[in-house]
Amino acid sequence: MRISVIGCGYLGAVHAACMAKLGHDVVGIDVDARKIEELAAGRAPFYEPALEELLKEVQEKGRLSFSTDLAAAEGSKLHFVCVGTPQKKGENAADLTFVDAAVKGLLPYLAPGDVVVGKSTVPVGTAGRLAELVQAQQPGAHLAWNPEFLREGHAVSDTLSPDRFVYGVSDGSEDHPAVSILDEVYSTSIASGTPRLVTDHPTAELVKTAANSFLATKISFINAMAELCEAAGADVTQLADAIGIDDRIGRKFLNAGIGFGGGCLPKDIRAFMARAGELGADQALTFLREVDAINMRRRSRVVELTRELCGGSLLGARITVLGAAFKPDSDDVRDSPALSIAAQLQLQGAVVTVTDPKALPNAARRFPELQYETDTSAAVLKADALLLLTEWQEYRDLNPYELVESVSSPRVLDGRNVLDAAKWRAAGWIYRGLGRP
Ligand code: UDX
């Protein structure tokens, strides 16, 4: 099938490459000429495991091309809208400028039978509004909402083998013409039994925001338990293991630490609250304010713990922050708790050095005032305290016995509760976890 993918960021570039891998003929379109140049040369403009190999593979087969011109979408049967919906400046609501521009820009190129497929996370009601625009321009075309659930760091495998598909169509019916077209596009996964639900537009939009809100709530729940564990002298990691065995609760997303960040969870829960307010249903989501507040409190808590660890003052303390990305296996620093903590420590007088295997160029653009060091051994040299804030495997594997020789004072704060506390203590370190005695 001929497919266009509008927006080639973390979502669209992966989606375009994966659709080509599934055998479709794909054009990726983005207004950013530099990004398109990189992608067309088979280079991923951001770090995502397995993406670059995939881009090269499908381009060699001639199944994926790139353009900065929306006219390249003409002739495609399906048009995936994968542009960003960031938080509006100074407000909680989502900024729909890019989604609106993508759909309006596509209108002149739509033919009867075409389907515009929204994948971006949008406030409920957006699909209905955009469907009217599509209908007015090309009555034979359709608009479906097909939310994306991929996780950064696993984006390629999540796109090729998703755990479910949700198709939101105007009448919510299996017989809607967009349903069979989407089934054809995703036939490989559908044939292997991946569940697929057909809903109306608002339900499909809400599925995405509800899922992200649930995940954020789960993380903040365990972080609230971490606060209690700290107050009571209990261990939140054992608590999570014990409650997680109950399969109604489940152990996943119960890792207490410095909290959630990234380009999705924080802005999605805020946009959801803003939209609920517009719909007169704000009370239903007031709990998300608490979820957000618990999450942000983790960052101040780490600053306070670091101060304690450094003997009561941060002034002049040499702090090494291990990890800048919002999660491992990604170079994404959007709303990264690790970087936000690094910046707060620096503001309070510490001398902060940040290291990360992939995210330093993005981190330096966002916080140019921090000091960055690519080499872990150089970064930890003469440190007064180490803070593990993004749990890259290489930081989990650090040898406390070797490291103790490099630092000035053997103090470590494990912001993700992933180090073996007993081993680090045995090697002579003062170890602090979050929500652990
Ligand atoms: C998330 C959703 O998981 C995905 O389905 C959706 O499509 C986009 O948003 P992503 O932002 O890639 O994906 O990251 P995710 O793996 O969900 O992690 C989000 C944040 O939560 C990270 O900062 C992570 O470190 C943190 N986290 C996750 C925890 O603090 N504890 C946990 O137990 C799990």
Image (cartoon, grey):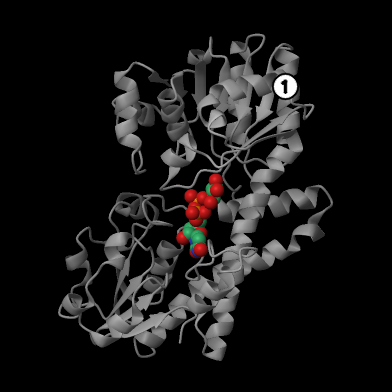
Residue in the image at 34% along x and 29% along y: 55
Residue 124 lies in quadrant: top right
Residue in the image at 36% along x and 59% along y: 324
Residue in the image at 51% along x and 13% along y: 71
At label 1, the amino acid type is Leu
Q: Is residue 210 left or right of residue 360?
A: right
Q: Is residue 430 left or right of residue 291?
A: left
**Where is residue 117 shown, x and y percent of the image?**
61, 26
Q: 305 and 317: which one is in front? A: 305
Q: Is residue 351 left or right of residue 256?
A: left
Q: Which residue is mark 1?
A: 133
Placement of 342 over or under 421, stated as above or below: above
Q: Does residue 261 appear in the picture of this structure?
A: no
**Where is residue 22 shown, x and y percent of the image?**
44, 25
Q: 349 and 158: which one is in front? A: 158
**Where is residue 416 shown, x and y percent of the image?**
42, 69
The residue lying furthest to the front in this view is: 192
- Asked if the residue at label 1 sits under 8 Å from ligand 1, the reply is no
Residue 292 lies in quadrant: bottom right
Residue in the image at 42% along x and 73% along y: 417
